[in-house]
Amino acid sequence: MAKYIPEPFRIKAVERIRLLSREERTERIKEAHYNLFNLKSEDIYIDLLTDSGTNAMSSEQWAGIMNGDEAYAGSKSFQSLLEVCHDIFRYRHFQPVHQGRAAEKVLFPLLLGEGKYAIANTFFDTTRAHVELAGAKALDAVVPEAKEPNLDAPFKGNMDTEKLLCLIEEYRRKIGLIVMTVTNNSAGGQPVSMANLRAVSKIAKEHGIPFCLDAARFSENAYFIKEREADYENKSLKEIVREMFSYADMFTMSAKKDALLNIGGLIGIKDDEELYRKVATRTISYEGFLSYGGLAGRDLEAMRIGLLEALDPAYLRFRIGQVRYLLERLEEAGIPCQKPSGGHGVFVDAKGLLPHIPYHQFPGHALAVELYIEAGIRSCEIGSFLLGRDPETGEQLEAEFEFTRLAIPRRVYTQTHLDYVADALAEIKKRRETIKGYEIVWEPPVLRHFQAKLNAL
Ligand code: F0G
Protein backbone atom coordinates (compact mmCIF):
# COMPACT_ATOMS: atom_id res chain seq x y z
CA MET A 1 0.00 0.00 0.00
CA ALA A 2 1.21 3.53 -0.76
CA LYS A 3 2.66 5.31 2.24
CA TYR A 4 0.73 8.21 3.70
CA ILE A 5 2.54 11.40 2.72
CA PRO A 6 2.94 13.58 5.82
CA GLU A 7 1.09 16.88 5.83
CA PRO A 8 3.37 19.59 4.38
CA PHE A 9 2.10 22.01 7.04
CA ARG A 10 1.71 22.14 10.79
CA ILE A 11 -1.47 22.97 12.64
CA LYS A 12 -1.81 26.41 14.18
CA ALA A 13 -5.49 26.59 15.05
CA VAL A 14 -7.81 23.71 15.87
CA GLU A 15 -11.56 23.28 15.82
CA ARG A 16 -13.20 20.90 18.26
CA ILE A 17 -15.34 18.05 16.92
CA ARG A 18 -17.43 15.60 18.94
CA LEU A 19 -18.97 12.22 18.39
CA LEU A 20 -22.59 11.73 19.39
CA SER A 21 -23.76 8.34 20.61
CA ARG A 22 -25.30 5.92 18.09
CA GLU A 23 -28.76 6.53 19.60
CA GLU A 24 -28.35 10.29 19.19
CA ARG A 25 -27.13 9.89 15.62
CA THR A 26 -30.07 7.63 14.75
CA GLU A 27 -32.44 10.24 16.19
CA ARG A 28 -30.74 13.22 14.47
CA ILE A 29 -30.84 11.69 10.98
CA LYS A 30 -34.52 10.80 11.43
CA GLU A 31 -35.26 14.39 12.50
CA ALA A 32 -33.35 15.53 9.39
CA HIS A 33 -35.81 13.52 7.21
CA TYR A 34 -32.89 11.35 6.18
CA ASN A 35 -31.34 14.23 4.26
CA LEU A 36 -27.72 14.81 5.27
CA PHE A 37 -27.95 18.48 4.26
CA ASN A 38 -30.44 18.95 7.11
CA LEU A 39 -27.99 17.81 9.81
CA LYS A 40 -26.35 20.37 12.07
CA SER A 41 -22.59 20.41 11.58
CA GLU A 42 -22.11 20.21 15.36
CA ASP A 43 -23.74 16.77 15.22
CA ILE A 44 -21.14 15.51 12.76
CA TYR A 45 -17.83 13.96 13.69
CA ILE A 46 -16.09 13.90 10.32
CA ASP A 47 -17.65 15.98 7.58
CA LEU A 48 -17.00 14.64 4.09
CA LEU A 49 -20.15 16.14 2.59
CA THR A 50 -18.11 18.32 0.27
CA ASP A 51 -14.67 19.69 -0.46
CA SER A 52 -16.35 22.99 -1.37
CA GLY A 53 -15.73 25.97 0.87
CA THR A 54 -14.51 23.63 3.61
CA ASN A 55 -10.80 24.28 3.04
CA ALA A 56 -8.46 25.33 5.84
CA MET A 57 -6.82 28.58 4.82
CA SER A 58 -3.11 29.15 5.34
CA SER A 59 -1.56 31.66 7.71
CA GLU A 60 -0.59 33.65 4.59
CA GLN A 61 -4.23 33.78 3.51
CA TRP A 62 -5.38 34.87 6.96
CA ALA A 63 -2.69 37.55 6.97
CA GLY A 64 -3.80 38.61 3.47
CA ILE A 65 -7.33 39.03 4.77
CA MET A 66 -6.15 41.90 6.97
CA ASN A 67 -4.77 43.59 3.85
CA GLY A 68 -8.05 43.38 1.93
CA ASP A 69 -8.95 46.70 0.31
CA GLU A 70 -12.68 47.16 0.85
CA ALA A 71 -13.09 50.08 -1.57
CA TYR A 72 -16.33 49.77 -3.55
CA ALA A 73 -14.51 50.49 -6.82
CA GLY A 74 -10.92 50.12 -7.97
CA SER A 75 -9.81 48.03 -4.99
CA LYS A 76 -6.10 47.23 -4.75
CA SER A 77 -7.00 43.64 -3.86
CA PHE A 78 -8.80 43.32 -7.21
CA GLN A 79 -5.72 44.60 -9.08
CA SER A 80 -3.44 42.12 -7.29
CA LEU A 81 -5.85 39.28 -8.01
CA LEU A 82 -5.89 40.23 -11.70
CA GLU A 83 -2.09 40.16 -11.86
CA VAL A 84 -1.97 36.62 -10.47
CA CYS A 85 -4.82 35.47 -12.74
CA HIS A 86 -3.10 36.92 -15.85
CA ASP A 87 0.09 35.16 -14.90
CA ILE A 88 -1.51 31.76 -14.26
CA PHE A 89 -4.28 31.57 -16.86
CA ARG A 90 -3.12 34.01 -19.57
CA TYR A 91 -6.64 35.28 -20.38
CA ARG A 92 -7.49 38.93 -21.04
CA HIS A 93 -10.47 39.30 -18.70
CA PHE A 94 -11.32 37.98 -15.26
CA GLN A 95 -14.43 38.63 -13.25
CA PRO A 96 -14.74 37.60 -9.62
CA VAL A 97 -18.18 36.44 -8.51
CA HIS A 98 -19.41 35.06 -5.21
CA GLN A 99 -19.22 31.34 -6.13
CA GLY A 100 -19.21 28.90 -9.04
CA ARG A 101 -22.92 28.89 -9.73
CA ALA A 102 -22.90 32.70 -9.86
CA ALA A 103 -20.35 32.43 -12.68
CA GLU A 104 -22.72 30.02 -14.44
CA LYS A 105 -25.69 32.31 -13.87
CA VAL A 106 -23.84 35.32 -15.32
CA LEU A 107 -22.27 33.55 -18.32
CA PHE A 108 -24.56 30.78 -19.55
CA PRO A 109 -27.62 32.83 -20.60
CA LEU A 110 -25.29 34.81 -22.90
CA LEU A 111 -24.55 31.62 -24.87
CA LEU A 112 -27.63 29.48 -24.35
CA GLY A 113 -31.41 29.88 -24.64
CA GLU A 114 -34.62 28.09 -25.64
CA GLY A 115 -33.95 25.31 -28.14
CA LYS A 116 -30.20 25.29 -27.52
CA TYR A 117 -28.02 22.46 -26.22
CA ALA A 118 -24.85 22.34 -24.15
CA ILE A 119 -22.55 19.31 -24.08
CA ALA A 120 -20.12 18.41 -21.29
CA ASN A 121 -17.95 15.47 -20.30
CA THR A 122 -20.26 15.42 -17.26
CA PHE A 123 -22.17 18.44 -16.00
CA PHE A 124 -22.07 19.06 -12.27
CA ASP A 125 -25.60 19.48 -10.90
CA THR A 126 -25.59 23.29 -10.48
CA THR A 127 -23.99 23.64 -13.90
CA ARG A 128 -26.68 21.44 -15.41
CA ALA A 129 -29.30 23.47 -13.54
CA HIS A 130 -27.97 26.75 -14.99
CA VAL A 131 -28.00 25.33 -18.51
CA GLU A 132 -31.64 24.37 -17.94
CA LEU A 133 -32.52 27.68 -16.23
CA ALA A 134 -31.17 29.40 -19.37
CA GLY A 135 -33.78 27.39 -21.32
CA ALA A 136 -31.33 24.93 -22.90
CA LYS A 137 -30.73 21.18 -22.56
CA ALA A 138 -27.64 19.65 -20.98
CA LEU A 139 -26.10 16.54 -22.54
CA ASP A 140 -23.24 14.44 -21.14
CA ALA A 141 -20.63 12.66 -23.25
CA VAL A 142 -18.14 11.12 -20.84
CA VAL A 143 -15.88 8.28 -22.00
CA PRO A 144 -17.39 4.81 -21.47
CA GLU A 145 -14.58 3.68 -19.12
CA ALA A 146 -15.81 6.23 -16.54
CA LYS A 147 -18.88 4.06 -16.09
CA GLU A 148 -16.89 1.02 -14.98
CA PRO A 149 -15.66 1.71 -11.44
CA ASN A 150 -13.33 -1.29 -11.47
CA LEU A 151 -11.54 -0.35 -14.63
CA ASP A 152 -8.27 1.38 -13.92
CA ALA A 153 -7.68 4.02 -16.63
CA PRO A 154 -5.66 7.22 -16.22
CA PHE A 155 -8.16 9.77 -17.56
CA LYS A 156 -11.67 8.59 -16.84
CA GLY A 157 -12.90 12.20 -16.78
CA ASN A 158 -12.39 12.62 -20.54
CA MET A 159 -15.00 13.59 -23.09
CA ASP A 160 -15.97 10.86 -25.55
CA THR A 161 -15.01 12.73 -28.73
CA GLU A 162 -16.89 10.32 -31.00
CA LYS A 163 -20.08 10.83 -29.03
CA LEU A 164 -19.43 14.58 -29.07
CA LEU A 165 -19.17 14.52 -32.87
CA CYS A 166 -22.38 12.47 -33.12
CA LEU A 167 -24.21 14.98 -30.90
CA ILE A 168 -22.87 17.88 -32.98
CA GLU A 169 -24.07 16.07 -36.13
CA GLU A 170 -27.51 15.48 -34.56
CA TYR A 171 -28.13 18.97 -33.16
CA ARG A 172 -25.92 21.03 -35.49
CA ARG A 173 -26.35 24.77 -35.00
CA LYS A 174 -28.39 24.34 -31.84
CA ILE A 175 -25.28 23.66 -29.75
CA GLY A 176 -24.40 26.83 -27.86
CA LEU A 177 -21.61 25.59 -25.62
CA ILE A 178 -19.18 22.77 -24.91
CA VAL A 179 -18.13 22.46 -21.26
CA MET A 180 -15.24 20.45 -19.89
CA THR A 181 -15.40 19.85 -16.14
CA VAL A 182 -11.85 19.52 -14.74
CA THR A 183 -11.58 17.33 -12.82
CA ASN A 184 -14.82 15.54 -13.68
CA ASN A 185 -16.60 15.71 -10.33
CA SER A 186 -19.64 13.54 -10.99
CA ALA A 187 -17.48 10.82 -12.60
CA GLY A 188 -15.43 10.50 -9.40
CA GLY A 189 -13.11 13.51 -9.50
CA GLN A 190 -11.43 11.83 -12.45
CA PRO A 191 -9.03 13.93 -14.52
CA VAL A 192 -9.18 15.04 -18.13
CA SER A 193 -6.03 14.57 -20.21
CA MET A 194 -4.30 17.33 -22.11
CA ALA A 195 -4.74 15.28 -25.29
CA ASN A 196 -8.49 15.21 -24.71
CA LEU A 197 -8.65 18.95 -24.00
CA ARG A 198 -6.72 19.55 -27.23
CA ALA A 199 -9.00 17.26 -29.24
CA VAL A 200 -12.22 18.79 -27.88
CA SER A 201 -10.86 22.29 -28.47
CA LYS A 202 -10.16 21.40 -32.11
CA ILE A 203 -13.67 20.02 -32.59
CA ALA A 204 -15.21 23.09 -30.92
CA LYS A 205 -13.21 25.44 -33.20
CA GLU A 206 -14.02 23.50 -36.36
CA HIS A 207 -17.72 23.79 -35.59
CA GLY A 208 -17.62 27.34 -34.25
CA ILE A 209 -18.88 26.32 -30.80
CA PRO A 210 -17.63 28.22 -27.71
CA PHE A 211 -15.58 26.02 -25.37
CA CYS A 212 -15.73 26.61 -21.61
CA LEU A 213 -13.76 24.99 -18.79
CA ASP A 214 -15.61 24.33 -15.54
CA ALA A 215 -12.36 24.81 -13.67
CA ALA A 216 -13.19 24.29 -9.98
CA ARG A 217 -10.48 21.64 -9.58
CA PHE A 218 -7.99 22.88 -12.15
CA SER A 219 -4.80 22.31 -10.13
CA GLU A 220 -5.71 18.76 -9.11
CA ASN A 221 -6.34 18.05 -12.79
CA ALA A 222 -2.95 19.56 -13.69
CA TYR A 223 -1.26 17.35 -11.11
CA PHE A 224 -2.76 14.22 -12.68
CA ILE A 225 -1.57 15.32 -16.13
CA LYS A 226 1.94 15.72 -14.72
CA GLU A 227 1.74 12.33 -13.04
CA ARG A 228 -0.04 10.28 -15.69
CA GLU A 229 0.41 11.79 -19.17
CA ALA A 230 3.48 11.30 -21.32
CA ASP A 231 5.63 14.41 -21.92
CA TYR A 232 4.30 16.37 -18.92
CA GLU A 233 6.44 14.87 -16.17
CA ASN A 234 9.04 17.61 -16.41
CA LYS A 235 6.67 20.52 -16.96
CA SER A 236 5.80 22.79 -14.06
CA LEU A 237 2.22 22.81 -12.79
CA LYS A 238 1.84 26.39 -13.93
CA GLU A 239 2.95 25.48 -17.46
CA ILE A 240 0.44 22.63 -17.50
CA VAL A 241 -2.36 24.90 -16.25
CA ARG A 242 -1.52 27.50 -18.90
CA GLU A 243 -1.69 24.89 -21.63
CA MET A 244 -4.99 23.46 -20.28
CA PHE A 245 -6.61 26.90 -20.28
CA SER A 246 -5.15 27.81 -23.70
CA TYR A 247 -7.52 25.29 -25.31
CA ALA A 248 -10.70 26.95 -24.01
CA ASP A 249 -12.33 30.28 -24.83
CA MET A 250 -13.57 30.96 -21.32
CA PHE A 251 -13.90 29.41 -17.88
CA THR A 252 -16.18 29.41 -14.89
CA MET A 253 -14.59 28.53 -11.57
CA SER A 254 -15.87 27.80 -8.13
CA ALA A 255 -12.94 29.14 -6.06
CA LYS A 256 -14.28 27.18 -3.07
CA LYS A 257 -12.33 24.11 -4.17
CA ASP A 258 -8.77 24.19 -5.54
CA ALA A 259 -8.36 27.94 -4.94
CA LEU A 260 -8.44 27.08 -1.22
CA LEU A 261 -11.10 29.58 -0.22
CA ASN A 262 -14.26 29.34 1.83
CA ILE A 263 -16.26 31.45 -0.64
CA GLY A 264 -15.57 32.80 -4.12
CA GLY A 265 -15.83 32.28 -7.85
CA LEU A 266 -14.28 33.50 -11.06
CA ILE A 267 -15.11 33.94 -14.72
CA GLY A 268 -12.32 34.12 -17.29
CA ILE A 269 -12.78 35.30 -20.88
CA LYS A 270 -9.81 34.69 -23.16
CA ASP A 271 -10.20 37.41 -25.78
CA ASP A 272 -13.86 37.94 -26.77
CA GLU A 273 -14.34 41.64 -25.93
CA GLU A 274 -18.04 41.68 -26.73
CA LEU A 275 -18.73 38.68 -24.52
CA TYR A 276 -16.71 40.21 -21.70
CA ARG A 277 -18.73 43.45 -21.92
CA LYS A 278 -21.94 41.44 -21.57
CA VAL A 279 -20.48 39.49 -18.64
CA ALA A 280 -19.55 42.79 -16.98
CA THR A 281 -23.08 44.17 -17.39
CA ARG A 282 -24.70 41.06 -15.93
CA THR A 283 -22.19 40.94 -13.08
CA ILE A 284 -23.11 44.46 -12.02
CA SER A 285 -26.82 43.49 -11.98
CA TYR A 286 -26.45 40.20 -10.12
CA GLU A 287 -23.17 40.22 -8.19
CA GLY A 288 -22.00 43.77 -7.66
CA PHE A 289 -19.42 46.12 -9.12
CA LEU A 290 -16.67 44.63 -11.29
CA SER A 291 -13.85 45.08 -8.79
CA TYR A 292 -15.52 42.93 -6.12
CA GLY A 293 -18.20 40.80 -7.83
CA GLY A 294 -20.15 39.68 -4.77
CA LEU A 295 -17.07 39.24 -2.57
CA ALA A 296 -15.32 41.38 0.02
CA GLY A 297 -11.88 42.81 -0.75
CA ARG A 298 -10.44 40.42 1.82
CA ASP A 299 -11.87 37.42 -0.06
CA LEU A 300 -10.07 38.62 -3.20
CA GLU A 301 -6.78 38.65 -1.26
CA ALA A 302 -7.42 35.14 0.04
CA MET A 303 -8.24 34.03 -3.52
CA ARG A 304 -5.04 35.53 -4.92
CA ILE A 305 -2.93 33.70 -2.36
CA GLY A 306 -5.00 30.51 -2.62
CA LEU A 307 -4.54 30.35 -6.39
CA LEU A 308 -0.77 30.45 -5.89
CA GLU A 309 -0.82 27.86 -3.09
CA ALA A 310 -2.97 25.59 -5.26
CA LEU A 311 0.02 25.16 -7.57
CA ASP A 312 2.50 24.17 -4.86
CA PRO A 313 3.76 20.68 -5.84
CA ALA A 314 4.36 19.62 -2.20
CA TYR A 315 0.78 20.50 -1.28
CA LEU A 316 -0.70 18.69 -4.30
CA ARG A 317 1.45 15.62 -3.73
CA PHE A 318 0.10 15.40 -0.19
CA ARG A 319 -3.46 16.18 -1.25
CA ILE A 320 -3.67 13.61 -4.04
CA GLY A 321 -1.72 11.16 -1.84
CA GLN A 322 -4.27 11.51 0.96
CA VAL A 323 -7.16 10.63 -1.35
CA ARG A 324 -5.18 7.70 -2.77
CA TYR A 325 -4.45 6.45 0.75
CA LEU A 326 -8.15 6.34 1.66
CA LEU A 327 -8.99 4.54 -1.59
CA GLU A 328 -6.32 1.92 -0.93
CA ARG A 329 -7.52 1.36 2.63
CA LEU A 330 -11.05 0.82 1.31
CA GLU A 331 -9.89 -1.53 -1.43
CA GLU A 332 -8.05 -3.54 1.19
CA ALA A 333 -11.36 -3.90 3.03
CA GLY A 334 -13.06 -5.06 -0.19
CA ILE A 335 -15.21 -1.93 -0.63
CA PRO A 336 -15.78 -1.23 -4.34
CA CYS A 337 -14.80 2.30 -5.40
CA GLN A 338 -14.29 4.31 -8.56
CA LYS A 339 -10.71 3.55 -9.60
CA PRO A 340 -8.08 4.91 -9.85
CA SER A 341 -8.24 7.52 -7.12
CA GLY A 342 -9.55 10.92 -8.16
CA GLY A 343 -8.66 14.38 -7.00
CA HIS A 344 -11.03 15.49 -4.28
CA GLY A 345 -12.41 12.37 -2.72
CA VAL A 346 -13.15 8.69 -2.84
CA PHE A 347 -16.32 7.66 -4.62
CA VAL A 348 -17.64 4.43 -3.15
CA ASP A 349 -19.51 2.34 -5.71
CA ALA A 350 -22.74 1.92 -3.78
CA LYS A 351 -24.32 -0.03 -6.64
CA GLY A 352 -21.52 -2.56 -6.24
CA LEU A 353 -21.71 -2.64 -2.45
CA LEU A 354 -25.52 -2.70 -2.17
CA PRO A 355 -26.68 -4.49 -5.33
CA HIS A 356 -30.04 -5.31 -3.74
CA ILE A 357 -31.08 -1.61 -3.71
CA PRO A 358 -32.38 -0.42 -7.12
CA TYR A 359 -31.44 3.04 -8.48
CA HIS A 360 -34.87 4.50 -7.67
CA GLN A 361 -34.29 3.63 -4.00
CA PHE A 362 -30.94 5.44 -4.07
CA PRO A 363 -28.18 3.04 -2.94
CA GLY A 364 -25.61 5.85 -2.69
CA HIS A 365 -27.89 7.73 -0.35
CA ALA A 366 -28.67 4.64 1.72
CA LEU A 367 -24.96 4.11 2.28
CA ALA A 368 -24.45 7.78 3.20
CA VAL A 369 -27.19 7.57 5.87
CA GLU A 370 -25.69 4.33 7.19
CA LEU A 371 -22.24 5.90 7.45
CA TYR A 372 -23.65 8.70 9.58
CA ILE A 373 -25.44 6.27 11.86
CA GLU A 374 -22.39 4.00 12.09
CA ALA A 375 -19.72 6.61 12.80
CA GLY A 376 -21.00 10.20 12.64
CA ILE A 377 -19.44 10.67 9.20
CA ARG A 378 -21.30 12.84 6.70
CA SER A 379 -20.92 12.04 3.02
CA CYS A 380 -23.03 12.73 -0.03
CA GLU A 381 -24.80 10.78 -2.73
CA ILE A 382 -23.71 11.36 -6.32
CA GLY A 383 -26.15 9.26 -8.29
CA SER A 384 -29.83 9.07 -9.21
CA PHE A 385 -30.98 11.04 -6.14
CA LEU A 386 -28.74 13.95 -7.20
CA LEU A 387 -29.60 13.61 -10.89
CA GLY A 388 -33.36 13.98 -10.37
CA ARG A 389 -36.18 13.70 -12.88
CA ASP A 390 -36.58 14.17 -16.59
CA PRO A 391 -37.71 17.84 -16.85
CA GLU A 392 -40.31 16.89 -19.50
CA THR A 393 -41.78 13.60 -18.26
CA GLY A 394 -41.08 13.96 -14.53
CA GLU A 395 -39.74 10.41 -14.46
CA GLN A 396 -36.86 9.51 -12.16
CA LEU A 397 -33.70 9.30 -14.26
CA GLU A 398 -31.18 6.53 -13.77
CA ALA A 399 -27.68 7.90 -13.21
CA GLU A 400 -24.61 6.41 -14.89
CA PHE A 401 -23.19 5.88 -11.38
CA GLU A 402 -24.50 5.32 -7.87
CA PHE A 403 -21.75 6.77 -5.72
CA THR A 404 -21.39 7.70 -2.07
CA ARG A 405 -18.83 10.46 -2.24
CA LEU A 406 -16.32 10.87 0.55
CA ALA A 407 -15.13 14.37 -0.35
CA ILE A 408 -11.96 15.35 1.46
CA PRO A 409 -11.77 19.00 2.60
CA ARG A 410 -8.34 20.46 1.83
CA ARG A 411 -5.76 20.61 4.66
CA VAL A 412 -8.39 19.70 7.28
CA TYR A 413 -8.21 16.01 8.24
CA THR A 414 -5.28 13.74 9.10
CA GLN A 415 -4.39 10.12 8.48
CA THR A 416 -6.14 8.88 11.63
CA HIS A 417 -9.38 10.55 10.53
CA LEU A 418 -9.15 8.70 7.23
CA ASP A 419 -8.39 5.40 8.99
CA TYR A 420 -11.51 5.91 11.09
CA VAL A 421 -13.58 6.41 7.90
CA ALA A 422 -12.17 3.26 6.31
CA ASP A 423 -12.86 1.20 9.46
CA ALA A 424 -16.46 2.46 9.60
CA LEU A 425 -17.11 1.39 6.01
CA ALA A 426 -15.55 -2.01 6.67
CA GLU A 427 -18.02 -2.44 9.58
CA ILE A 428 -20.96 -1.48 7.38
CA LYS A 429 -19.86 -3.98 4.72
CA LYS A 430 -20.33 -6.81 7.22
CA ARG A 431 -24.08 -6.11 7.44
CA ARG A 432 -24.69 -4.73 3.98
CA GLU A 433 -27.59 -7.12 3.13
CA THR A 434 -29.64 -5.54 5.93
CA ILE A 435 -29.38 -2.01 4.54
CA LYS A 436 -32.62 -0.70 2.99
CA GLY A 437 -33.36 1.84 0.27
CA TYR A 438 -35.14 5.21 0.53
CA GLU A 439 -38.14 6.92 -1.03
CA ILE A 440 -38.65 10.65 -1.48
CA VAL A 441 -41.69 12.01 0.34
CA TRP A 442 -41.23 15.67 -0.66
CA GLU A 443 -38.99 17.43 -3.19
CA PRO A 444 -38.60 20.91 -4.72
CA PRO A 445 -38.63 21.31 -8.54
CA VAL A 446 -34.87 22.06 -9.02
CA LEU A 447 -31.70 20.86 -7.25
CA ARG A 448 -33.90 18.66 -5.12
CA HIS A 449 -31.23 16.77 -3.21
CA PHE A 450 -30.42 19.79 -1.03
CA GLN A 451 -33.94 19.98 0.37
CA ALA A 452 -35.81 16.73 -0.28
CA LYS A 453 -37.35 14.74 2.57
CA LEU A 454 -36.99 10.97 2.53
CA ASN A 455 -38.30 7.90 4.31
CA ALA A 456 -36.52 4.64 4.93
CA LEU A 457 -38.24 1.75 3.13
N1 F0G B 1 -18.74 23.09 -10.96
C1 F0G B 1 -18.29 22.00 -10.32
C2 F0G B 1 -17.49 20.98 -11.06
C3 F0G B 1 -18.59 21.83 -8.96
O1 F0G B 1 -18.13 20.73 -8.34
C4 F0G B 1 -19.35 22.81 -8.30
C5 F0G B 1 -19.69 22.67 -6.89
C6 F0G B 1 -19.79 23.93 -9.02
C7 F0G B 1 -19.45 24.03 -10.35
C8 F0G B 1 -20.59 25.02 -8.36
O2 F0G B 1 -19.80 25.78 -7.55
O3 F0G B 1 -20.74 25.50 -5.25
O4 F0G B 1 -19.22 27.40 -5.82
O5 F0G B 1 -21.53 27.36 -6.67
N2 F0G B 1 -19.55 21.60 -6.27
C9 F0G B 1 -19.75 21.36 -4.85
C10 F0G B 1 -19.57 19.90 -4.56
C11 F0G B 1 -20.98 21.96 -4.28
O6 F0G B 1 -19.89 19.51 -3.42
O7 F0G B 1 -19.07 19.17 -5.40
P1 F0G B 1 -20.35 26.54 -6.24
Image (spheres, rainbow, N blue to C red):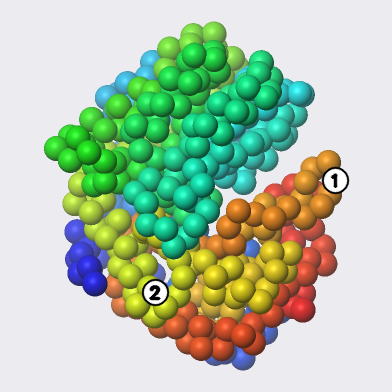
Describe the element under mark 2 as helix, strand or loop: helix
Find disc 2 in the rendering and name its residue: 330
State the residue at coordinates (62%, 74%).
Answer: 355
Residue 36 in the image: state x and y as whole percent: 62, 68
Give 452 or 405, whichever is nearer the viewer: 405
Q: Which amino acid type corresponds to the residue marked 1 in the rendered image?
A: Thr
**Can residue 243 be seen in the rendering of this structure?**
yes
Q: Which amino acid type corresponds to the residue marked 2 in the rendered image?
A: Leu
Residue 49 in the image: state x and y as whole percent: 52, 63
Q: In the picture shown, does residue 83 fall above or below 241? A: above
Q: In the picture shown, does residue 271 fall above or below 85? A: above
Q: Quadrant of the C terminus?
A: bottom right
Q: CA distance from mark 2 to mark 1?
A: 39 Å
Find disc 1 in the rendering and name its residue: 393
Using residue 12 as the reference point, say whether residue 191 is left or right of it.
Answer: right
Where is residue 309, by image quadrant?
top left
State the residue at coordinates (59%, 62%).
Answer: 402
Q: Quadrant of the N terminus?
A: bottom left
The reply to whether the C-beta atoms of the residues labelled 2 and 1 are less than 8 Å apart is no
